[in-house]
Image: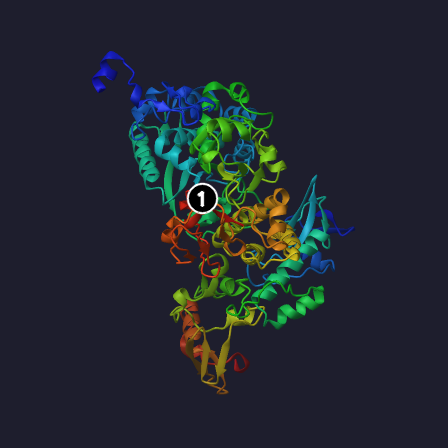
Amino acid sequence: MVSFIIDGKKVEAEEGAMLLDVARQNGFVIPTLCTHESVGRSGACRLCVVEVKSGKRMRVVTSCMYPVAEGIEVSTKTDRVMNVRRLVMQLLMARCPESEVLQEMAVEMGVKPEPRFTPDTDKGKCILCRLCVRACQDVVGVSAIGSSYRGPNKSVGPPFMEDSSACIGCGACAFICPTEHIHMEAMDSKRKIWGRTFKMQACEKCGRYFAPVDQLKFISQKTGTPMTELAVCMSCK
Amino acid sequence: MSEKQAFKGEIIDRLLYKDPATGQKITYEHDVPFYKKQMRLIFGMNGQLDPTSLEDYLALGGYSALAKALKTMKPEDVIQEIIKANLRGRGGGGFPAGWKWDETRKAHGEPKYVICNADEGDPGAYMDRSLLEGNPHLVLEGMLIGAYAIGSSKGYIYVRNEYPLAVENVMIAIDKLHEAGLLGNNILGSGFNFDISINRGGGAFVCGESSALFASLEGRAGEPRVKYIHATHKGLWDKPTNLNNVETWANVPFIINKGADWYRSIGTENSKGTKIFSLVGKINNTGLVEVPMGIKLREIVYEIGGGIPGGRKFKAVQTGGPSGGCLPASLLDTPIDYDELTKHGSMMGSGGMIIMDDQTCMVDVARYFMHFLEGESCGKCVPCREGIRRMTEILQDICDGKGTEADITLLENMSKGILDGALCALGNTAPNPVLSTLRYFRDEYIAHVRDKKCPAGVCNALIRYSILSDKCTGCGLCLKRCPAEAITGEKKKVHVINDATCIRCGACKDGCKFEAIIVE
């Protein structure tokens, strides 16, 4: 166990625990967009920044990936911290002017859009947090989507933005997307995502369409469970 | 002629170097002003050996430092010597190399890696290339000594693929070392095993950042990662890794051979040894210059560099690569070392040095570098990916005459946010071109936004070409040269430029023999 200070309050935590988690457990509010309990951390959105004094050194760090240590002094609301968070929110709002999630967050944080930034029209609601990419890779294990290009042209999708043969249509990416950028269209016997249409499996008992056939095939392959055993939905099992 | 020179030792006057400043002919290389003030320690051997020959390098005393380290020094002694010499990283950070080695040696985890960072991506900088092309064994010897000190058996050279000759010469050097038993198992009978592989970079500037370089080496996209746990503990494939720049490695054999005390005698209090700069831009003598730390900017510009072409006025020097800063004429007497450059809002970087004259617009310079960085940002974190491009947009507007005074405040606030908020060193230093030009050339920004003028006469939207009626002789040359047919006038009568069709290319002004054309 190590003890240290957050905004003047003494807290204790396991050594090596991430600062964001410890701070939240202790009731401190720190905004994030690119963290999710199901996937690894990346430190991309920079909203969770805090100022940490360690020894004589004072610096702004991303709390989601900063391992806590004995004696550090953490400030979650200094001018430097708020300046970074404000800038990040304004930049993201200019990138994704249609995102309600960002607008709500901005109101909560007291951040107004920067009128000097011309809003983008071609980025949709994607903030490039890449939670979808990490979920597809780490949780689902198919890596059907990834990022391409760099800098301002960076984008997320299947390779070459063509229909992906690796995608199983599970929808984990759409589920984890914090800004509802990824569209998944459900039409009973069919589901459409990333431009591909997937055939849905109807439950053998209740008849409800519950999962894409490709996803069941993938599970069957991975676990060795015969397809026949997978043709029943979770509620009827 | 060759007979005269080779057999009779006669000097052929007409082939001698003529100093452009004085017109004097100079017989010996070391008397040429360009070389006179230099201290060519690292580069010293470059002209004396064939880089593909191991024998040449050996004949000049090569690998004697390695032999000395392996035969007479314990790994800890080698590290202590480097710490004592206070060798600081030449790639830009200036972190003491000895401490890094020590950390990596003490870190838990096997194997340990040593890496030579040769992903030199700064525009106009080519010191690493010249070292790898011209004397690869010096760098390899440094790596061998480092690996022995750290306890590593595997090294990588990450070199950009745009340097084919560097890649080739290093490959030849590695092959020769294998043949000679200087790479591989039981080197010089010491029981020390080490091998080096070459990895060619795909051309991303950001891959010069250590964690992005690791990602690229591991076969993933070159994106930096958060480094609260240092690479010395968790680097390449999460193993202890020591990464140094080409030039840093090249310093090592000299320190081991001649000792830390000798090395410490060169340079300033906290910056020891020499530094190679790539001197480019508006300067008479361009090229790579190696100077002792602490030399004044003025000496580099006016003595080594031979001053500004055409007798124009020096305006600024940009040091430290794209994310470095611009220093004005008032700082010409600054001694060059890591701390002084940082103090004045620039940085050592890897050693790029771009000289600018009074015909350079500093807002345009900031815009250029931000545009470069915008394209080289990996796109992972928000402040860098989105922030730099927004800053570039604002700077473009200022250059186009569409800026306001509020833009300057906004640029400053954004700079602070990006500096604090970006994930890696590329983003953390990206606002430097803007901050340093605002610090020293704020009046130029004000002229752009308030008076809608570009004092240097560069930004097209803010300048106007016109013909002085008292100087124009009506020769018609400008009319002929104008590609936009924007000039009218009869022979021997004063000509006129039509501002609406003028494309501001400057062809008329360059061609006028009577200095009758002005830019406002």
A195 relative to A28 in the view: left or right:
left
| Residue farthest along the front direction in this orientation | B492
Q: Is residue B384 visible?
A: yes
Residue plotted at (57% across, 33% down): B338
Q: Is residue A17 visible?
A: no
Instruction: Say which of B174 and B334 sits in front.
Output: B334
Instruction: Say which of B122 and B464 sits in front.
Output: B464
| Residue farthest along the left direction in this orientation | B3
B505 relative to B16 in the view: left or right:
right
- Residue A129 image point, x, y percent: 55, 62
Residue density around tag 1, few if under 14, some if 14–19, many if 20 or more, within 10 Å: few
- Residue B42 image point, x, y percent: 43, 27
What amino acid is labelled 1 in the image? Pro
Instruction: Say which of B452 and A173 sits in front.
Output: B452
- Residue B62 image point, x, y percent: 37, 23
Secondary structure found at label 1? loop
| Image quarter of residue B309 | top left
| Image quarter of residue A146 | bottom left
Please say which color scheme the image uses. rainbow
- Residue A12 image point, x, y percent: 73, 51
- Chain bearing tag 1 is B
| Image quarter of residue B404 | bottom right
Residue B250's place in the image compared with B466, above or below, is: above
Instruction: Say which of A2 and B467 sits in front.
Output: B467
B489 relative to A34 in the view: left or right:
left
| Residue farthest along the top direction in this orientation | B8
Residue A52's place in the image compared with B497, above or below, is: above
Q: What residue is disc 1 on?
A: B123
